[in-house]
Structure formats: structure tokens, C-alpha cells
């Protein structure tokens, strides 16, 4: 038994003709960057690992600051002086897609590229390269991009 289904796709094709790559790139870029931002902005559970002193000077500074009350133990995230790493991720559209940036002064040490990320944070805080690679591996980037393109076509009158 055989069935022949026919659909009029002329409206969808016309909508595709009205959409240019210059329109698609920033929308897709922003959608994918926002997904990455949402992953990066989640604070992981505290590792509980001891932070080793880098030198005798850093050890003296730590204990002097502890005595003066400039720091407290245990460290509380988001306390006085915190720059709010998770809230500082910003997505900016550009001609080729989008840029994802963080304005916290220590962002690179915590979630930067592998070469920049402090060894202490590796394995606890996801780095930008790690998140990008994971989104590629598990298909999240492609799924988000496809949904953005479908949205563009739908807004163009094909849906």
C-alpha cells in the first residue's frame, strides 16, 4: 500500500528567501551564547579542597588579613567585596554571531580558557572551552541554533 502526501511549501520557501545570513548569524549567535551563559552562571557546589599557599608571603598576608578582619573563614560566596561572577556574564550580538564576556576581574582565573583557569578551579568550575565543547558534543549548540533559525523563519511569515 502506498500513500502520496502533498504539501504546499511555497510559503516556507518564500520566507527562506526573505532571510539573509546577516540576519541569521547574530540571532543564532545570541541564542547559543545565552545558553552557554546560563551554564556558566550556575555556581557549582563548593569543592571543600584546601587552597594551598603560593608562597611564605601569601601565607603571612592571609593570616594578617584574618587577624584584621579583612577576610573570614570559611569564605562565603557573594559576601562583601564579591563581584558576583555569575551575574556578570553578558551576551552582545555582533556581525558574525555574538560575544560572551564576564566583567568580574577574576573571571579568567575561575572560568577562563584552560591555560588561564587556575588549577584549583579546574574540575569544579566549568571553563568556557569546556562548556563550548560539551555543547557541541551533546548537541545543545545545534539544537539551540535550529530553534533560533525556525523562529526567524516563522517570524518571516512561513509559519
Image (cartoon, helix red, strand yellow):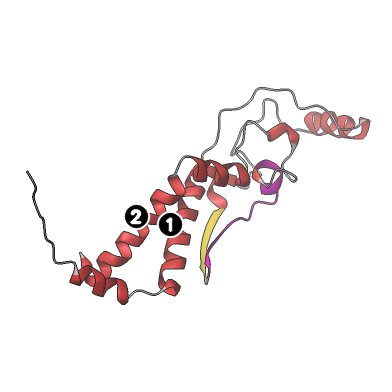
Q: Quadrant of the N terminus?
A: top left
Estimate the x, y position of residue 109 in percent, counting from the top left.
71, 44
Which residue: 13% across, 62% down?
7
Which residue: 63% across, 42% down?
127
Residue on which the image places disc 1:
31
Residue on which the image places disc 2:
147
How crowded is the residue under tag 2: few (<14 C-alpha within 10 Å), some, or many (20+)? Answer: few
Q: Earlier in the sequence, mark 2 or mark 1?
A: 1
Q: Residue furthest front?
A: 1
Q: Nearer the viewer, residue 111 or 149?
A: 149
Which residue: 54% across, 44% down?
40
Q: Nearer the viewer, residue 39 or 129?
A: 129
- The answer to whether the residue labelled 2 contacts the one labelled 1, judged by CB atoms less than 8 Å apart, is yes
- Residue 90 can be seen in this image: yes
- Residue 70 can be seen in this image: no
Estimate the x, y position of residue 25 in percent, counting from the top left.
46, 67
Q: Nearer the viewer, residue 14 or 74?
A: 14
Estimate the x, y position of residue 158 in percent, counting from the top left.
22, 68
Estimate the x, y position of residue 87 in percent, counting from the top left.
53, 49
Vertical placement of residue 72 versus 141, above or below: above
Disc 2 element: helix
Q: Is residue 72 magenta?
A: no
State how far apart marks 2 and 1 are (Cα): 9 Å
Vertical placement of residue 85 versus 28, above or below: above
Which residue: 60% across, 27% down?
46
**Relative side of 63 to 50, left or right:** right
Looking at the rendered structure, the number of numbered marks drawn on it comes to 2
Disc 1 element: helix
Vertical placement of residue 142 versus 26, above or below: above
Point out the stretch of residues depicted in magenta.
Answer: 96-110
How crowded is the residue under tag 1: few (<14 C-alpha within 10 Å), some, or many (20+)? Answer: many
Amino acid at each position: 500500500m502506498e500513500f502520496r502526501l502533498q504539501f504546499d511549501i511555497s510559503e516556507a520557501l518564500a520566507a527562506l528567501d526573505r532571510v539573509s545570513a546577516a540576519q541569521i548569524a547574530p540571532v543564532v549567535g545570541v541564542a547559543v551564547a545565552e545558553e552557554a551563559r546560563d551554564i556558566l552562571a550556575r555556581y557549582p557546589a563548593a569543592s571543600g579542597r584546601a587552597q594551598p599557599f603560593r608562597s611564605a608571603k601569601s601565607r603571612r598576608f592571609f593570616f594578617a588579613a584574618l587577624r584584621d578582619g579583612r577576610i573570614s573563614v570559611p569564605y562565603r560566596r557573594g559576601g562583601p567585596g564579591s563581584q558576583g561572577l555569575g551575574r556578570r556574564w553578558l551576551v552582545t550580538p555582533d556581525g558574525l554571531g555574538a560575544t560572551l564576556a564576564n566583567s568580574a576581574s577574576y573571571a579568567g582565573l575561575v572560568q577562563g580558557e584552560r591555560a588561564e583557569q587556575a588549577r584549583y578551579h579546574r574540575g569544579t568550575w566549568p571553563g568556557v572551552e569546556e562548556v563550548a565543547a560539551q555543547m557541541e558534543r551533546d548537541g545543545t549548540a545545534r539544537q539551540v541554533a535550529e530553534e533560533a533559525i525556525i523562529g526567524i523563519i516563522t517570524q518571516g511569515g512561513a509559519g
